[in-house]
Image: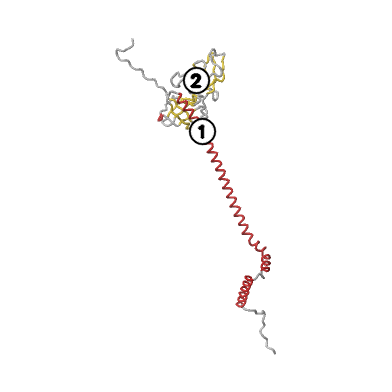
Amino acid sequence: MPQPGNLRLFRQGPSVEVRLVLLLVLSLALVIVDAHWSVLAPLRNAISVAIYPFQRTVMAPREALDFFDSWSHSASTVRAEQDAIRRQRIEMAQLSTHAAQLVAENEQLRRLLGVAEATARQSIAVEVFYVPPNVFSHRLIFNKGSDDGIEAGMPVIDEGGVVGQIVRVTPFTSEAALLIDDSISIPVQVLRNGLRLIAFGSDEAGRIEVRYLADHADVEEGDMLITSGIGGLFPAGLSVGRILKIERDSGTGFGRAIAEPLSHPERYRHFLVLSIEKASPPTSQEPGHAAE
């Protein structure tokens, strides 16, 4: 009987080492041929075209990430530039407003200096510190007080005329009642004929009034009211207001005149506080020189 031989299930080829050497030799040969001749260019182009879709598929995630990163960076850059432009526009608007405000304040200060030169009394320039939140009174708080020489009773003026009167003083601030406040009264006279009257705050918003006018009082609409100087607090000749209308009461025989103040404290921040002329005490007569 024949002896059974060894069964070979798989055909054995070259060893791994032999195949590696063959591949290295083939690669080297291809490199040499490609470097000196162009016979492999069509093959390389064909392989490149064949694998291009796979390259695009593999590179698509990275390109998507690069596109998203570039888009987000561009969007953030655009937002930053827009924010910078808005900020610059706001700053330019603030600078323009501030410059216009300075121009207006300088013009007002020049007019105040002209008023101070025309007034014989000494004056103190003040600035509005704040406006008290009280709807029942019309007051202003200034940034100077008794340490700067301000006293209660001093008149406050602007380029339009009388603004009000100092009613309360602290070392560093002072409070002024405006002309339309019912807590103060000012001796006035009609510029046209010199008729002396007294002006008070009115119950009409933004107005002053002259009370207890006799039927025969020579007062007309449009007359200018100025300070008369009586009492010594307000110097004579300061503008106070212009009469808008005259109301007569036939029952009492008296009337009243409603006037519009010529000063504008709601428009400005700087004012002048005029000093009060204090009466000098009478000089005592020496013995033997008494008036006969």
- Which kind of residue does numbered mark 1 sit on? Val
State the mark number for residue 226.
Answer: 2
C-alpha separation, residue under disc 1 versus residue under disc 2? 29 Å
Q: Circle 2 — which element?
A: strand
Q: Position of residue 85 (x, y in %)?
A: 57, 44
Name the residue located 63 percent from the left edge and 79 percent from the top edge. Answer: 14
Pick whichever, 74 or 208, lies toward us: 74
Going by the picture, which residue comes out furthest to the front?
36
Name the residue located 54 percent from the left edge and 40 percent from the top edge. Answer: 92
Judged left or right of residue 121, residue 213 is right
Q: Circle 1 — which element?
A: helix
Placement of the N terminus among the 4 image quadrants: bottom right
Question: In front: mark 1 or mark 2?
Answer: 1
Placement of the C terminus among the 4 image quadrants: top left
Going by the picture, which residue comes out furthest to the top?
292
Name the residue located 50 percent from the left edge and 20 percent from the top edge. Answer: 226
Q: Which residue is mark 1?
A: 103
* Neighbours of disc 2 within 10 Å: few (<14), some (14-19), many (20+): many
* Neighbours of disc 1 within 10 Å: few (<14), some (14-19), many (20+): few
Q: Position of residue 20 (x, y in %)?
A: 61, 75
